[in-house]
């Protein structure tokens, strides 16, 4: 029996399951270079020893975590919904708002999960190109496409993954004034840009912000993301959430991380390191067509004429994200430990 023939026809070409462990200093997934603090590890270990709540299902409404997130973002708990990573929030958006064949609008290049999640949920992604010279958002094009294609959801990512470019507040306001669809603002890297547009949620009930503990808070392994939005928006998304989606350990750890002081120091360190690296990366400009884009996030997007730059860096022990297809002359590298960053810079000097 050929199982493939049972798979949904539109997903068959995606079957590609393989296990390929790759070793190297991780600069490929924009994770945090900081391990969890000793104090926090102690708190969690103590909690596990003293509590016996792990035999019960987790709090399905994530009450304590939502309250903590609400406190730190100046919203109320009913404006917060938690998911297994912001990937799950993206899935909730599709499940809540898309009818079969509906369109979403996505930036290109950007996070591939929007189009993938739309496809899995029987929707269709239409892409608009970011401006070629600096990857800024083409606001007029977006407004026109929204009028013509009538998408259910418009995805905006700021700072954008992989380009590191921001969507300015005035641009976001122009978009919100001009469209009548759901506007999903992916702020997975928002903590690194210093921009805060959350007050716009009051005026625009169709705006939803996607956040994560995977980047600035260093909890990628626990898979915690959340949505911030109007009460109506959060209630709508909650209708497709299965019970008990977020484990107890994930809920209590994320809440504890938010209450601890160190994440702010970690962000400040990454921003200093970003300045230091950018200054050096700019000195490489022009060598073999190398160019590094300015970044508002915790990674750099770089272009060069060296075809196998990703592989050459891997030979030197560095795992970066190398692209294929129309982005094949680009790589993205996360800001990691000082040692990793120095090796990255030295390797580029050597290769270019
Ligand atoms: N949005 C963007 C722009 C991302 O880069 C990522 C992670 N690569 C996510 C969302 C998903 O993050 P998570 O599911 O870990 O919260």
Image (cartoon, helix red, strand yellow):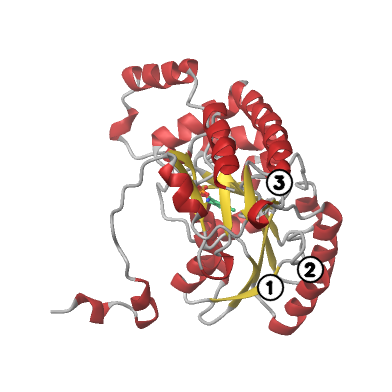
Image quadrant in which you'd find residue 59: top left
User: Badge 1 local density, few (<14 within 10 Å), some, or many (20+)?
Assistant: some
- Closer to the chain start, of discs 2 and 1, is 1
- Closer to the chain start, of discs 2 and 3, is 2
When the figure is inspected, residue 299 is found, relative to residue 2, above or below; the finding is above
What residue sits 53% from the left and 63% below the top?
112
Q: For mark 2, what is the residue? A: 138
Q: Position of residue 247 (x, y in %)?
A: 39, 40
User: Badge 2 local density, few (<14 within 10 Å), some, or many (20+)?
Assistant: some
Q: Is residue 145 visible?
A: yes
What residue sits 40% from the left and 80% below the top?
10
When the figure is inspected, residue 29 is found, relative to residue 289, above or below; the finding is above
281 or 47: which is nearer to us? 281
Q: Position of residue 175 (x, y in %)?
A: 80, 65
User: Badge 3 local density, few (<14 within 10 Å), some, or many (20+)?
Assistant: many
166 or 150: which is nearer to us? 166
- Closer to the chain start, of discs 1 and 3, is 1
Image quadrant in which you'd find residue 335: top right
- Which disc, if any, is residue 295? 3
Instruction: Give the SS element for disc 1.
Output: strand
Q: Is residue 334 visible?
A: no
- Distance CA(mark 2)–CA(mark 1): 8 Å
Instruction: Give the SS element for disc 3.
Output: loop
Circle 2/circle 1 CB separation < 8 Å: yes
Instruction: Give the SS element for disc 2.
Output: loop
Q: For mark 1, what is the residue? A: 128
- Distance CA(mark 2)–CA(mark 3): 18 Å
Q: How many marks?
A: 3
In the image, which is nearer the foreground, mark 1 or mark 3?
A: 3
Outermost residue, left direction? 1
């Amino acid at each position: 029996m050929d199982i493939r023939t049972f798979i949904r026809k539109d997903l068959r070409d995606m079957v590609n399951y393989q296990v390929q462990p790759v070793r190297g200093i991780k600069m490929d997934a924009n994770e945090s270079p900081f391990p969890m603090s000793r104090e926090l590890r102690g708190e969690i270990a103590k909690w596990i020893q003293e509590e016996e709540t792990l035999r019960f299902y987790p709090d399905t409404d994530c009450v304590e975590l939502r309250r903590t997130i609400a406190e730190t973002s100046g919203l109320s708990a009913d404006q917060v919904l938690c998911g297994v990573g912001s990937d799950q929030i993206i899935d909730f958006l599709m499940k809540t708002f898309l009818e079969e064949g509906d369109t979403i609008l996505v930036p290109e290049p950007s996070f591939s999960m929007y189009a993938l999640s739309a496809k899995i949920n029987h929707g269709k992604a239409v892409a608009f190109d970011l401006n070629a010279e600096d990857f800024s958002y083409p606001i007029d094009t977006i407004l026109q496409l929204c009028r013509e294609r009538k998408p259910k959801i418009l995805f905006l990512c700021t700072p954008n993954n992989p380009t590191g470019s921001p969507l300015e507040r005035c641009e976001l306001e122009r978009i919100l004034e001009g469209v009548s669809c759901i506007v999903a603002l992916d702020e997975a890297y928002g903590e690194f840009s210093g921009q805060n547009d959350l007050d716009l949620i009051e005026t625009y009930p169709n705006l939803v912000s996607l956040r994560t503990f995977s980047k600035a808070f260093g909890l990628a392994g626990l898979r915690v993301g959340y949505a911030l939005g109007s009460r109506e928006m959060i209630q709508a998304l909650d209708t497709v959430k299965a019970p008990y989606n977020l484990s107890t350990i994930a809920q209590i750890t994320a809440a504890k991380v938010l209450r601890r002081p160190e994440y702010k120091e970690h962000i400040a360190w990454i921003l200093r390191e970003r300045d230091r690296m950018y200054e050096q990366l700019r000195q490489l400009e022009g060598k073999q067509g190398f160019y590094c884009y300015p970044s508002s996030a915790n990674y750099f997007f770089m272009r060069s004429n060296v075809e196998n730059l990703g592989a050459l860096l891997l030979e030197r022990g560095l795992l970066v994200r190398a692209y294929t297809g129309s982005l094949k002359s680009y790589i993205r590298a996360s800001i990691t430990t000082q040692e990793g960053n120095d090796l990255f810079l030295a390797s580029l000097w050597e290769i270019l």
